[in-house]
Amino acid sequence: MNVHESEKIAGIFVELGYSSTDKVEEADLILFNTCCIRDTAEKHILGNIGDVKCLKKANPNLIVAVVGCMTQQKGMAENLKKKFPFISVVLGTDNLSELSSAIRSIEEKNKRFIADVHDDPNVDVGCALPIHRTSGTNAWVNIMYGCNNFCTYCIVPFVRGRERSRSPKDVLAEVRSLIAQGYPEITLLGQNVDSYRYENYDFSALLQEIAQIDGKFRLRFMTSHPKDFDSKVIDVIASCPNICNNIHLPVQSGSNRVLKLMNRRYTRERYLEIIDEIRGKLPGVGITSDIMTGFPTETDEDFADTVSLMERVRFSNAFTFVYSPRKGTVAAEMEQLPAKVKQDRITELVRIQNRISSELSNVYLGKTEEILTEDVSPKHEGCVCGRTESGRLVTYPGQADLVGKFVNVKIESARSSALFGRII
Ligand code: SAH
Ligand code: SF4
């Protein structure tokens, strides 16, 4: 989500005549696109903003701007100004469209500080912004903004506002244009794609219509929410060969007690039922998840339930997070667990997931998979890398001219979760 927002921001700067530099000391403008989902992300960004102070001293004309969801927290714009007086612009996620005029005012009128953080949860978010796409072969497309779920640990509904679905007409026009530009992969984005709705048009209808656009491309989407998961989506994936057999379905916890406290509104049993249905209809599917450790009051038994769910589902990959309290959320007011308990538990989860990912690699040995070449391998000279439809990374001999092309690769070896092969 944030990567795609950075592409929109880059689009604005390209229009303003700026270009990017790798040398921060030479920059005329530094912009921080922030995230506040977890405490670690927020601390990290505050540290980075602090580091800019000396650059501003050396170059008093340097413009420092801060945007993104961190700024949407109550009182944050004023706090930032007080803590870092060298910041010139603070804008919220909902008013990126004003970035261009804010930068111009600073450049031309020498205004010192502009803060504009809207508190309107229903505002239409920058659909018409220019986008400078930087994600190589993949193009991100927002289909909805915001979230209505209020999971008790999560700050997203507070900083991103209520759920708003884009019209199918706009989404289809954007995807058609991206395919015409030659993007071989499209990923539809939303906090809860299963609750996409525009008049009587739901997510499965949108997915099907996009999949039927002419051209050779892959279609992915994220994130699905188990509470709203719609079987029709599995049927659409099964009937459209260009929709990847890859579903990201965050479970967060395997304990019904914790799921209830998290306000996730599904049970462990329902989650496993969805997994069985997906696997029954989509053999070879890659299922990934987000899992949290250390939610307030999580006991050893609750944690054991999460471990047993992981062993039962065998995710192809899992993003694991240590719970961090976010101000203003319900869970932040609950009694917190000691940091060591949270840390020990995540270490255990990472160990288990690494083992499972390794074991699953063996399933691919000897198979031939269609791979979209995404990049030159950063680790293996003379090689490129790309993904299977199920989302697994494969490295194979090849040159940069393969990037963006589909190739058939025979998988010959595996090293933990990494697969290696050759083009046939
Ligand atoms: N809308 C998606 C996820 C959005 S946030 C969903 O419902 O699954 C991405 C992930 O960040 C979440 O799945 C969750 O695992 C993690 N996360 C959110 N808030 C967190 C917090 N306060 N502490 C730790 N992890 C958190
Ligand atoms: Fe946060 Fe829950 Fe919404 Fe996901 S569904 S963004 S975790 S509130």
Image: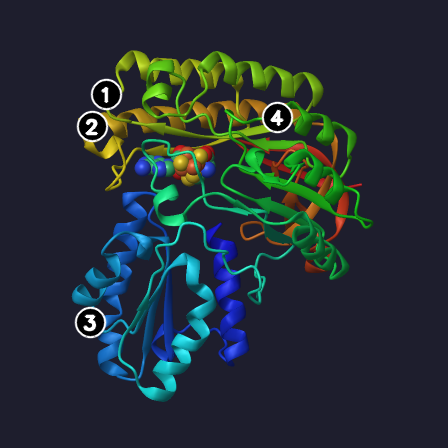
Please provide percent x and percent y for residue 168: 67, 47
**Residue type, label 1:** Thr
Q: Nearest the camera: 98 or 404? A: 98
Q: Which mark is residue 297?
A: 1
Q: Earlier in the sequence, mark 2 or mark 4?
A: 4
How far is mark 1 from mark 3, CA to CA? 40 Å
Helix, strand or loop under label 4: loop
Q: Which mark is residue 85?
A: 3
Q: Are marks 2 and 4 in contact (CB under 8 Å)?
A: no
Q: Are marks 1 and 2 in contact (CB under 8 Å)?
A: yes
Residue under the image location 41 percent in, 25 percent down: 264
Q: Seen from this angle, which residue lies furthest front?
A: 199
Q: Which residue is mark 2?
A: 334
How far is mark 2 from mark 4, CA to CA? 33 Å
Nearer to us of marks 1 and 2 is: 2
Q: Quadrant of residue 365?
A: top right
How far is mark 3 from mark 2, CA to CA? 34 Å
Q: Which mark is residue 103?
A: none
